[in-house]
Amino acid sequence: MLWLAAFLIVPSLIMLGYSLLTRTDLAQVGPPWTLENWQRVFGYDALFREWVPDNLRVLWRSLVIAALSTLLCVVMGYPLAFYIARQEDRRKQMLLLLLVIPFWINFLIRVYAWILILRPFGLYPSTAATFLGMVYALLPFFVLPVYASVEKVDWRLLEAAQDLGASPLRAFLAGVVPQTLPGLIAGVLLTFIPALGMFVVSDILGGAKTALIGNLIQNQFGQAGDWPYGSALSFLLMGAVLLGLWLYARAAGQKGLEELL
């Protein structure tokens, strides 16, 4: 509780306080207290007194890109986790090492390296390059928890299902997939949440052509110097993440969530 209070609750309250302050002409932050930043977050332009929901469009675009990146990680990483887990011990350790060895190199250097790889093929900058960069960055975060669940699978359930006449696909879906559900949930969360707030990949590989919510927040705390507005945008992103977690927990089932926790 002390850890959560010091590194989650207190910083969130400070950010909430900033979101209610005003940015002065000299890029300073201070009174008066105002709700104007929150109005801007939800698209109300106080100057022209009209609703312009650009931020909500950016958030929706970010949600779609994060969801598609997570789906690609699931399609690629789920079979990979099974493949690694079914190898002999020495080969398994080598494959796990190859999976995590990119983390030994700075993330920015790895992203910039993709420019050299993609530029000759005409794929840089582009949305496809952004997806590729996100999947490359987040795939290990999906594979590792799924691999941990696959390691604990009781394969006798698969054999029993096949002995009772189930097809290989049905036996796998009924006997194996439920056992890997905790790892699958953890992998999806560890992939979707960072993808939703990521701004480095879209800035570098996307050529900053497609603004995501992470780029918008980073710009407010950096170039624009509008910390109150950036704080309010951060709470919008936080709310979207919490809503996504709640919906996913309901879809995955209470049992799978309890096993994960």
Image (cartoon, grey):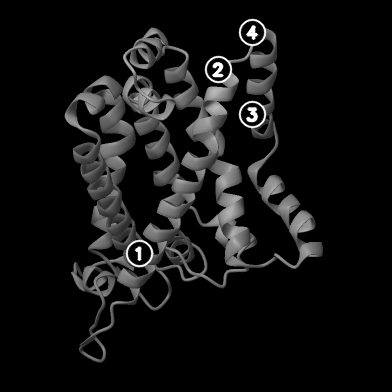
Contact flag, marks 3 and 2 (Cβ < 8 Å): no
Report the front residue among 207 and 186: 186
Residue 187 appears anywhere in the view: yes
Q: Residue at x 53, y 31 (%)?
A: 79
Look at label 4 and name its amino acid: Asp
Report the front residue among 129 and 47: 129
Report helix, strand or loop for mark 1: helix
Report helix, strand or loop for mark 4: helix
Task: Classify the position of the N terminus by image quarter.
Answer: top left
Residue 23 appears anywhere in the view: no
**Marks 1 and 3, how far apart in space?**
31 Å
Task: Report which residue position mark 3 lands on.
Answer: 99
Report helix, strand or loop for mark 3: helix
Residue 180 location in percent, x, y?
Answer: 38, 23
**Marks 4 and 1, how far apart in space?**
44 Å
Q: Residue at x 60, y 65 (%)?
A: 206
Look at label 2 and name its amino acid: Ala
Task: Report which residue position mark 1 lands on.
Answer: 59
Look at label 3 and name its amino acid: Leu
Report helix, strand or loop for mark 2: helix
**Marks 2 and 4, how far apart in space?**
9 Å
Look at label 1 and name its amino acid: Leu
Outermost residue toward the front?
A: 165
The answer to whether residue 169 is above or below residue 251 is above
